[in-house]
């Protein structure tokens, strides 16, 4: 018996040693920030063997070939316009008014880090109800004459997903160019055959970065989280909604769905079209499916009553800079009166956390609205942890009670706003492919803030005292989830 236990002990010791060596090799063979490195070492060492299964889902990065396909995509003809704008802004006399200085420097930031073209005189509509949004969007798709470009993290095989597919098949049969780019993980359960009839009718559909099956591509992170629709190069949609019945409030689990999406008419459409074409060309397998001639997709756009200046900013793991996070930091740091944020996932890194705390202690009215219910348990517990930490530093925390809050918005001083796909979390900053619209328009920002005020009526204020009254078990789950926050 003693010999048997000695053999078992040596086997277990060998497994532990191999596991530790494999953990070190796995974590350090790819470039990561310090927080993510320690988080993965914690998972791989404390949960032998099973930790590597978790890593297969959450830790593996896209291949160098996939990332190079994204990096190698040309920024199209807008790069020349951006260079001209850079020179114009650089040579302008320094504005005397502080607000104009903030405006100018923020524009230059995005020009520098993302070659983001500033488009003036856009007309922007705001949607918070999925039924209204998709009714308008589908009507415009039905009226399309030349091209329909669609990119979503999620397109489900459900009622609205089938409605969209049928509509796209009709347009393809009419000779309209239809291209659909979807994420294979976000569109879980949707097989390539879902688009077979669309392809037969002359349309195109492909998963992002050629991930054709979840059997071979089971990464939860490093996904295409963007939501882009461009119709005839004239009208575009961007925001937080995906294509699925739950986004129309048809899911008993989530109830009413509260999100924010934009319809844009104007030069801002070009930034979204440019991003779609780059993502599309990086993802298709057949050379015949590549978009080679760009000019037809950037027609002249005439806008009446357009007052919104905007820049579209994209970020993803293919680049060194966390561009949208830098944009969020910029908006937080230049605030002089208030910062109002909505995000379903509040898992900020140290830079965002410090900036929010500095703003709150400096007397800025910092408000953050999060959901009252989880859709991902660990993510929500980490969200609660950071919400509690910020509440203790003077930030007002609201939990939205009327269904699920999925909006990703930031409004600053009633003058600048951001709406898009990026949450205030590690995943959106570092791990996924995202796109946001940053807008310089006091009227539009005021409209978004009025929506925020209306949402407060359906919220509960989470004071430090209410957080303190939470159970010890709940607080433990929050603290444990926080340790994993760099990889959630």
Image (cartoon, rainbow, N blue to C red):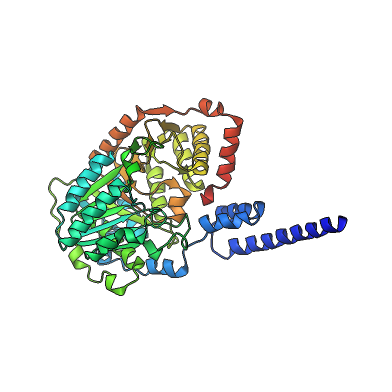
Q: Is residue 376 left or right of residue 88?
A: right
Q: Nearer the viewer, residue 46 or 349?
A: 46
Asked whether 49 or 368 is in front, the reply is 49
When the figure is inspected, residue 433 is found, relative to residue 295, above or below; the finding is above
Relative to 183, is 386 on the left or the right? right
Q: Which residue sits at x=56%, y=43%?
A: 481
* Residue 5 position within the rendered picture, expressed as x and y whole percent measured from the top left: 82, 55
Q: Is residue 291 above or below residue 478?
A: below
- Quarter of the figure that contains the N terminus: bottom right
- Identified at 29% across, 46% down, the residue is 159
Foreground: 48 or 334? 48
Residue 246 x/y as whole percent: 35, 42
Task: In the displayed orientation, state which residue is furthest to the bottom.
Answer: 287
Residue occupying the point 25% across, 49% down? 163
Q: Position of residue 157 (x, y in %)?
A: 33, 51
Q: Residue furthest right?
A: 2
């Amino acid at each position: 018996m003693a010999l048997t236990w000695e053999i078992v002990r040596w086997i277990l010791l060998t497994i532990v040693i191999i596991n530790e060596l494999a953990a070190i090799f796995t974590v350090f063979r790819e470039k990561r920030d310090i927080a993510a490195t320690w988080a993965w070492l914690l998972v791989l060492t404390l949960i032998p063997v099973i930790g590597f299964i978790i890593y297969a889902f959450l830790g593996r990065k896209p291949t160098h070939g996939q990332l190079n396909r994204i990096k190698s995509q040309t920024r199209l003809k807008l790069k020349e316009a951006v260079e001209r704008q850079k020179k114009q802004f650089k040579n302008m006399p320094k504005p005397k008014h502080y607000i104009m200085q903030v405006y100018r420097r923020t524009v230059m930031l995005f020009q520098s880090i993302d070659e983001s073209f500033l488009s003036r005189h856009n007309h922007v509509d705001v949607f918070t109800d999925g039924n209204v949004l998709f009714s308008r969007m589908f009507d415009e798709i039905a009226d399309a004459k030349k091209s329909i470009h669609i990119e979503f993290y999620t397109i489900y095989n459900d009622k609205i997903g089938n409605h969209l597919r049928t509509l796209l098949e009709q347009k393809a049969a009419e000779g309209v160019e239809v291209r659909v780019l979807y994420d294979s993980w976000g569109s879980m359960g949707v097989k390539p055959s879902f688009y077979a009839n669309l392809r037969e009718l002359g349309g195109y559909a492909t998963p992002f970065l050629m991930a054709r099956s979840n059997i071979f591509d089971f990464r939860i992170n490093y996904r295409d989280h963007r939501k882009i629709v461009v119709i005839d190069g004239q009208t575009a949609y961007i925001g937080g909604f995906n294509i699925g019945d739950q986004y129309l409030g048809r899911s008993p689990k989530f109830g009413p769905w509260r999100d924010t999406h934009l319809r844009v008419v104007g030069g801002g459409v070009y930034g979204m079209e440019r991003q779609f074409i780059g993502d599309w060309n990086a993802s298709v397998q057949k050379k015949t499916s590549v978009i080679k001639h760009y000019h037809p997709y950037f027609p002249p756009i005439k806008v009446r009553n357009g007052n919104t200046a905007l820049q579209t900013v994209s970020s993803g793991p293919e680049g060194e800079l966390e561009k949208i996070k830098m944009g969020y930091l910029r908006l937080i740091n230049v605030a002089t009166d208030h910062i109002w944020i909505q995000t379903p996932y509040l898992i900020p890194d140290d830079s965002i956390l410090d900036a929010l705390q500095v703003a709150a202690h400096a007397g800025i009215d910092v408000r953050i609205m999060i959901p009252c219910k989880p859709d991902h348990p660990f993510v929500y517990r980490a969200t609660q942890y950071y919400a509690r930490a910020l509440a203790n530093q003077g930030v007002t925390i609201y939990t939205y009670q009327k269904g699920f809050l999925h909006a990703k918005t930031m409004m600053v001083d009633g003058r600048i706003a951001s709406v898009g796909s990026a949450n205030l979390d590690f995943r959106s900053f570092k791990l996924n492919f995202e796109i946001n619209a940053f807008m310089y328009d006091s009227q539009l920002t005021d409209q978004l803030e009025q929506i925020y005020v209306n949402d407060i009526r359906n919220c509960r204020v989470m004071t430090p005292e209410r957080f303190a009254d939470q159970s010890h078990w709940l607080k433990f789950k929050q603290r444990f989830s926080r340790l994993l926050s760099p990889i959630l």
